[in-house]
């Protein structure tokens, strides 16, 4: 058992010498640490991107709702102006008819 590693929990013995086994375990550990660190960085970047996109969507939603309310206000103003214009035309037509009939004095 020269150079063999004994597992103290259940008494198993690895046949590979420690000088070979330990560097492989170190490389394995370094690999998963690197991958875990990369996953952590990617997750943080994704969370930041998600936060920024959500804020951007909220701003655009606010702007869209504001634009819709302005458009509705403009539509109501247009309808009111069209009604006033129609009333003015009707009054002008009525005055024109009265003038033709001679009911209005000439100026």
Image (spheres, rainbow, N blue to C red):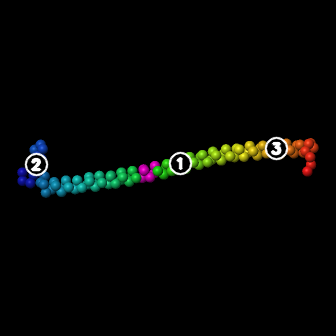
Q: Which numbered mark, 1 or 3, is in the foreground of this view? A: 3
Q: Secondary structure at mark 3?
A: helix
Q: Is residue 51 magenta?
A: yes
Q: Is residue 52 left or right of residue 41?
A: right
* Res 60 seen here: yes
Residue on which the image places disc 2: 6
The Cα atoms of the two marked residues, 1 and 3, are separated by: 43 Å
The Cα atoms of the two marked residues, 3 and 2, are separated by: 109 Å
Q: Earlier in the sequence, mark 3 or mark 2?
A: 2
Q: Is residue 38 left or right of residue 68?
A: left
Q: Secondary structure at mark 2?
A: strand
Q: Is residue 82 left or right of residue 54?
A: right
Q: Secondary structure at mark 1?
A: helix
Name which residue lies at 61% across and 48% down.
70
Name which residue lies at 15% across and 56% down.
20
The Cα atoms of the two marked residues, 2 and 1, are separated by: 67 Å
Q: Position of residue 18 (x, y in %)?
A: 13, 54
Q: Label 3: how many residues lie within 10 Å, few (<14), some (14-19) or many (20+)?
A: few
Q: Position of residue 2 (x, y in %)?
A: 6, 53
The extreme left residue here reads 1
Residue on which the image places disc 1: 62
* Res 100 seen here: no
Name which residue lies at 42% across and 50% down.
50
Q: Which residues are magenta?
A: 49-54
Q: Which numbered mark, 3 or 2, is in the foreground of this view? A: 3
On residue 91, which mark appears? 3
Q: Position of residue 28 (x, y in %)?
A: 22, 53
Q: Is residue 13 magenta?
A: no
Q: Nearer the viewer, residue 44 or 24?
A: 44
């Amino acid at each position: 058992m020269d150079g063999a590693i004994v597992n103290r929990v259940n008494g198993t013995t690895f046949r590979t010498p420690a000088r070979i086994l330990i560097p492989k375990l170190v490389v394995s550990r370094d690999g998963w640490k690197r991958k875990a660190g990369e996953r952590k960085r990617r997750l943080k970047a994704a969370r930041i991107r998600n936060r920024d996109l959500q804020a951007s969507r909220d701003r655009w939603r606010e702007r869209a709702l504001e634009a819709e309310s302005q458009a509705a206000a403009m539509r109501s103003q247009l309808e009111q102006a069209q009604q006033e214009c129609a009333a003015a035309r009707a009054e002008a037509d009525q005055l024109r008819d009265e003038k033709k009939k001679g009911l209005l004095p000439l100026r």
